[in-house]
Amino acid sequence: MKPTTHVVDNEKMDRAILVSLVTQEQKKREALAEYSLQELVQLAETAGVEVLATMTQNKESADTKWFIGKGKVEELRALMEELGANTAIFDQELSGAQVRNLEEALDAKIIDRTQLILDIFAQRAKTREGIIQVELAQLSYLLPRLSGQGKNLSRLGGGIGTRGPGETKLETDRRHIRERIGELKAQLEEVVRHRKLHRERRKKSGVFQVALVGYTNAGKSTLLRQLTNADVYVENQLFATLDPTSRTLTLPSGKEIVLTDTVGFIQNLPHDLVAAFRATLEEANEADLILHVVDSSTEMRNEQMRVVAEVLEELGAHRQEQLTVFNKIDLLPDEQQAMLFAEGDFIKMSAYREDDLQRLRLAVQDKLMGERLTFRIPADKGELISLVYRIGDVLENEVDGEEMLFQVRVNKDDYAKMGYLLAAYDQHKQQYGQEDKGESF
């Protein structure tokens, strides 16, 4: 494997061998295990690590002491000495005891997949909320593993696994970490309270909220930028953006909605991370519509869609209205595009084609604004006419004698609000003995 080039001091740079254990259970899904290792390579390079080689072991189950077999540990040690590696990164999560045993046997820094992801998040976090959430996740991960983090944390001074709060871990005992976790949770609760107030204000104003969710690197930030001209960081790498970004999107009808880009998902997303980022991910929970963005060009798209569905279910957002967006179809041959399918509504597009973006805007509008209904309102009932404009998207209106005829697109969630309007109209019909000339409801 060709090493990634970085302009840094080679003495301090993380030069790693990546290790994956494939158990009997995982062997049934061998392609997934191979993909997970490829993803680990991307994660390591994203964290600024020079990947020297990868190593895989097939084993009935994980070794409680070494994780991989003792013989494989010796093989790994020899390979690290041969290539000059100073770090071993494991594709699965390790216990504190396994970390301690491996670092003593290999005389190197030991990092697992969870710690690597947390490190990337520590690099990406820019806002106060993001920084708090990353530190909370790191400390929650560290606390049960303190006994296995001795030499590992002092080795090489800095680098992956020691960013953020990592540099002070040696001076921090369990009591101090618990106190710090308590402080961070209190700060996060305050952030959550403010975020909830903002969401409630948006809901009261009648502004629809749409959340972009999907696997990392599916193109969510690109889509946000292309749809709203947002000044957001876009790069072909995992977790290019971390903190949620909200922008106003104007639909073809002229109605404005709020479009929010959320953090990307990944298989085996650390539980501590999901818990810490719940406040951010709840944007999806509160959204009127979720756009599930899928990288249609990858062979693992079905697996990635499954991961996103699982995380949404864990958050309780799986019941929200969804529209699947098969992005990057310009990278697929026509015959493969025809095979793309998802349960529920979906659209196939490229974020770089304006006609595709317009189709997406129309699809979002149809999802949010609902079906087209006809209302007849007495011309002198100003409060009812005002209500129609407030809770529906008026497409057409005309005067018909003493009545106003409205063609309105109404979201199903707002349809209940029409109860007052319909009751008032029924009363009007009974009073004047008129027949209903509008569409049936």
Image (spheres, rainbow, N blue to C red):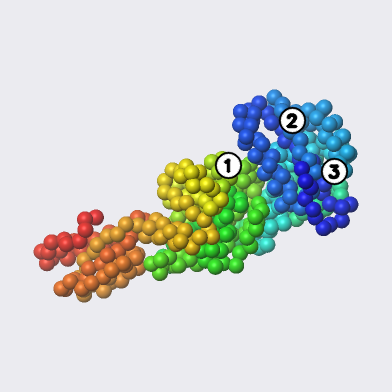
Q: Earlier in the sequence, mark 1 or mark 2?
A: 2
Q: Dividing the picture into quarters, in which one does residue 112 lie?
A: top right
Q: Earlier in the sequence, mark 2 or mark 3?
A: 2
Q: Is residue 374 visible?
A: yes
Please state which amino acid type lies under the numbered disc 2.
Gln
- Local crowd at mark 3 within 10 Å, few (<14), some, or many (≥20)? many
Please state which amino acid type lies under the numbered disc 3.
Ala
Query: Mark 2 — residue?
Result: 57
Distance Cα–Cα, label 3 vs label 1: 31 Å
In the displayed structure, 104 sits above or below 13; it is above
Quarter of the picture containing the C terminus is bottom left
In the displayed structure, 319 sits above or below 422; it is above
Residue 357 in the figure: left or right of residue 421: right
Residue 324 in the figure: left or right of residue 191: left
Query: Mark 1 — residue?
Result: 299
Comparing 225 with 168, the one in front is 225
- Local crowd at mark 2 within 10 Å, few (<14), some, or many (≥20)? few
Query: Mark 3 — residue?
Result: 85
Residue at position x 52%, y 56% in the image? 350
Quarter of the picture containing the N terminus is top right
Residue at position x 24%, y 64% in the image? 375
